[in-house]
Image (cartoon, helix red, strand yellow):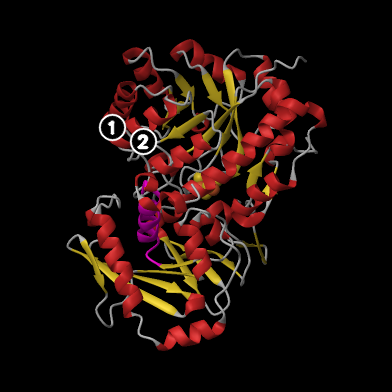
Amino acid sequence: MTDTLKLPELVCPAGSLPALKAAIDHGADTVYLGLRNDTNARNFAGLNFDDKTAREGIRYARSRGRKILLAINTFAQGASTGRWRSALDQAADLGVDAVIVADLGLMEYAARHHPELRLHMSVQGSATNHHAINLARDLFGIRRAVLPRVLTLDQVRAVMDKTDIEIEVFGFGSLCVMVEGRCLLSSYATGESPNTHGACSPARFVRWEQGAGELKARLNGILIDQFVKDEAAGYPTLCKGRFQVGGETYYALEEPTSLNVMSMLPELIDIGVSAIKVEGRQRSPAYVAQVTRALREALDTAGRERHRFSVRPAWQQALNNVSEGRQETLGAYHRPWK
Amino acid sequence: MRIPDFTLPSPVASLVGTLPATPPAWLLVQSLNHLLKKGILPADTGLLDGRCFMVAVKDAGLNLCFCCSNEAFRLAPAGAVPDLTLSANFADFLRMMLREEDPDTLFFNRKLSIEGDTELGLIVKNLLDSVDWSETPLARFMAV
Ligand code: SF4
């Protein structure tokens, strides 16, 4: 390996203009955003960008040599595909550097009507192998695929060996364990889930009840978890709830943890991933600043030190502090039993 | 500037607790209205209209209650039940306002509690997050 090996792009989230600026000021190469509607998977009240703030954000990024991606990553619903198509028209008009799309019909629309618009295949598209990725390349000209968080490092490497498409992987953030938003657990309790309404456990169904000792999390009336005093809490998603199974109450599906691949950066650089993505468009500018700063330093250091690289306590602490449930995992990247 | 870890000493709470909460709440309401008028708070006040809030500063023993109606903030009428209650210690509210700490982080760490209408809480959080302080005199106090 030579020293000229290119570092992966650091792709950071923004749910507001101040978050976008925080990402850029703290070292993001690229920032991804969503519009203010259900065409993206973080459709929360008051979050995201309208035309004016998007334009201002793009200007801010461009003048500093950085890039902006627009996530249009939910699935167009039968009767109302117009909203998704106009989001693509708007992306082309705004002049974003790429759109992140999951729906095949939308990829086709974009390829036909906006051939100059760069297409990235969203993680929600669930392309887990090179056949799927190469097919999307041949059909719609996608330039990059975001791999689901369910693949191991060896599996990521195997995909990369067989495609010339850029590969983006997740580096840090809350975990969505079930095939990336295709899971319907949220619909089961509320009638709405990420790929149908752009949010898992929509806030209007969530109630936090502070009892004498414990904090109870209810989703549409259903008790999904309770935390004793000072126990770290997480987002009220069903996959991270505690359930009674066989007479025992525990995290039956997934613990509330955050993915953190910092210790694996030299390997990710080696196998040549094009981009490393940070989750969290729903978080505040403070989170974006802290996480971007830590990952920027870690990535640059890993690029310099290669296999002598070790994770510095300060970076680890910065990420621990903002993590959901205060635990971290290498997720599927590292499965010793595989 | 990094806000050090501190809790207001309990005499403060017992002292403040005996004072009427109106002056601090009044100040808060005035500041919010000022930001609204200057267009700094990019508020779609329609989302907040008719809703009442309580900000409980635990270590100061202060409960600040206010409502939003007709595109302005006002002191909550006596006996109003808040739709949303946010409670934390003074230092953590400060960290949140100055963008040193993300509210979700404080919530996960059990330093901030949110009760009542969670969606309203999200609206308020996203509203505060979207304020661009860079053009205001407060910019130099902000962490990001
Ligand atoms: S319930 Fe969990 S796995 Fe399912 S969509 Fe929500 S976060 Fe993802």
Badge 1 or badge 2: first in the primary sequence: 2
Q: Residue furthest right?
A: A308
User: Relative to A62, does residue B89 appear above or below in the rendering?
Assistant: below
- What's the magenta bit mostly, secondary-structure-wise? helix
Query: Where residue A70 sits in the image (x, y, percent)?
Result: 41, 30
Quadrant assignment, res B66: bottom left
- The quadrant holding residue A81 is top left
Tell me where the magenta segment starts and ends, as one range: B116-132
Q: Quadrant of the N terminus of chain A?
A: top right
Label for residue A35?
A: none
Question: According to the image, label 2 marks what residue?
Answer: A39
Q: Callout 1: residue from which chain? A: A
In the picture of the structure, the residue carrying the numbered disc 1 is: A83
Q: Tag 2, which chain?
A: A
- Label 1 with label 2: CB-CB less than 8 Å: yes
Q: Is residue B74 above or below residue A192?
A: below
Using the rendered view, name the quadrant where residue A273 is placed: top right
In the foreground, A118 or B26: B26
Q: Position of residue B134 (x, y in %)?
A: 39, 44
| Secondary structure state at the residue bearing disc 2 | loop
Q: Is residue A231 left or right of residue A91?
A: right
Compared with residue A330, is residue A216 higher up or lower down, i.e. above or below? below
- Examine the rendering and report whether any part of residue A336 can be seen: yes
Secondary structure at numbered mark 1: helix
The residue drawn where x is 67% and y is 63% is A246
**Amino acid at the residue labelled 1:** Arg
Q: Between A225 and A283, which is closer to the camera in this rendering?
A: A283
